Image (spheres, grey):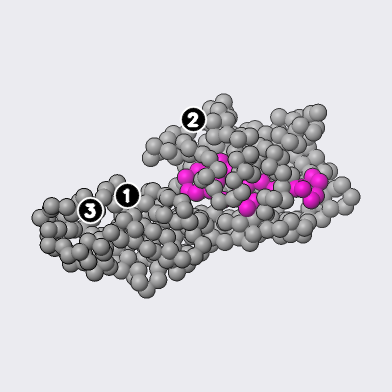
Amino acid sequence: MFDVLILGAGASGLMCAAELASCKDLKVGVIDANANVGAKIKISGGGKCNITNTEVTENNYLGDENFVSSVLNAFTKEELLEFLHENGLKPVIRKSRYYFCEKSSDEILSIFRRLTKNTQYFLDENILHVSKDADIFVVKTSRTQYQTKNLIVATGGVSYKTLNATDIGIQIAKQFGHEVTEFSPALVGLTLQKDQFWMKELSGISAEVEIDVEGKKLREEMLFAHRGISGPAVLSASLYWKKGNMFLNFLPERDINALIKNSKKNISSVLNLSKRLSKALLDALHVEDKPCNKLTKEDIDNLQLIQKYPFAPAGNFGFTKAEVSRGGVKTESLHGKSMVSKKVDGLYFIGEVTDVTGELGGYNFQWAFSSGVVCAREIKSRYNG
């Protein structure tokens, strides 16, 4: 019999277990389908784990803003960094805003292993079914079954099938009467409709853009790929896109009218983009590459679209290419100060399995860590109290 059983040894589950470890009276177990803990942490961020971001607010997430704010404020980015520093890890900042492990993700994994050395791990076990008998949860796995007073579902999403990702978390939620948003791919490249097939010819080229999607403006690199468009700006945009147009600004720091005014240079020369991209854009806008002082009013009108190019994706690259899963357990059925279910005593949902998804750039790890700590602190307060 366990006091706490955590389903999933990913970022949220490990942080939760690490926080619970300070309460010596608790018997804690963790079950995971992989042979090693933190499988997704291990490979994320090119093996260096993008832990968090220099700026973290509820505005960086798709989800209920009040709920997200409550959890993030309970365990902030600053507190996360302090926790890491105290345990010998000093993340480095890349691209002025992303916190990474300096050498490899093993640095953060070693912290979790050390802090949870008294936690019982049951690895290489698939979770098959969960039931509740009176006040006790019964978890049946591919090997045996376990009993626990408190059950924490930290099973993540379905975007990494190679890491044994399944939707067992939302299946458990539905079984116990919670509403869920079915998982869909997020932080993923977007495919093209026929009108944008010209972009295929630019495969391998990147450009800094600003994307306007569902009222959000996201500025970072966009990468042209054979199947469509990708890169950091597009991955974050995919989180918010529902259907219809988003708008691409290929000159986020410049004004097209100021660039062409009184210039005798060809348009492609003043755009300050790669020649291939400039030529392709002009062709797509049906504007001849000619001296700026020879432009017609129609040409000038068409050139405005360089800063507001309408793009309606055909779809996305799918779960096999998605960084995370959008959707999960609806947060209106959870308490924001504890992550506990409002429907079932002793049942918690943390991390990616909840209907909260962050933009690219460490936001989803921050959510995992914050929600894991919030959950653990609530449990500790009951046992310590």
Q: Nearer the viewer, residue 208 or 137?
A: 208
Tell me how far mark 3 sits from mark 2, CA to CA.
46 Å
Mark 3 or 2, nearer chain start: 2
Q: Is residue 278 above or below residue 98?
A: below
* Residue that label 3 marks: 257
Q: Residues within 10 Å of mark 1 (few under 14, many from 20)?
A: some
Q: Residue furthest bottom?
A: 194
Mark 3 or 1, nearer chain start: 1
Q: Residue furthest top?
A: 86
Q: Residues within 10 Å of mark 2 (few under 14, many from 20)?
A: some
Choose mark 2 or mark 1, whichever is in front: 1
Q: Residues within 10 Å of mark 3 (few under 14, many from 20)?
A: few
Choose mark 3 or mark 2, whichever is in front: 3
Residue at 58% x, 43% y is 367
Check disc 3 and report its element: helix, strand or loop: helix
Check disc 2 and report its element: helix, strand or loop: loop
Q: Amino acid at mark 2?
A: Lys
* Residue that label 2 marks: 90
* Residue that label 1 marks: 252
Q: Is residue 345 left or right of residue 45?
A: right
The stretch of residues the image draws in magenta is 341-367
Tell me how far mark 2 sits from mark 1, CA to CA.
33 Å
Q: Amino acid at mark 3?
A: Asn
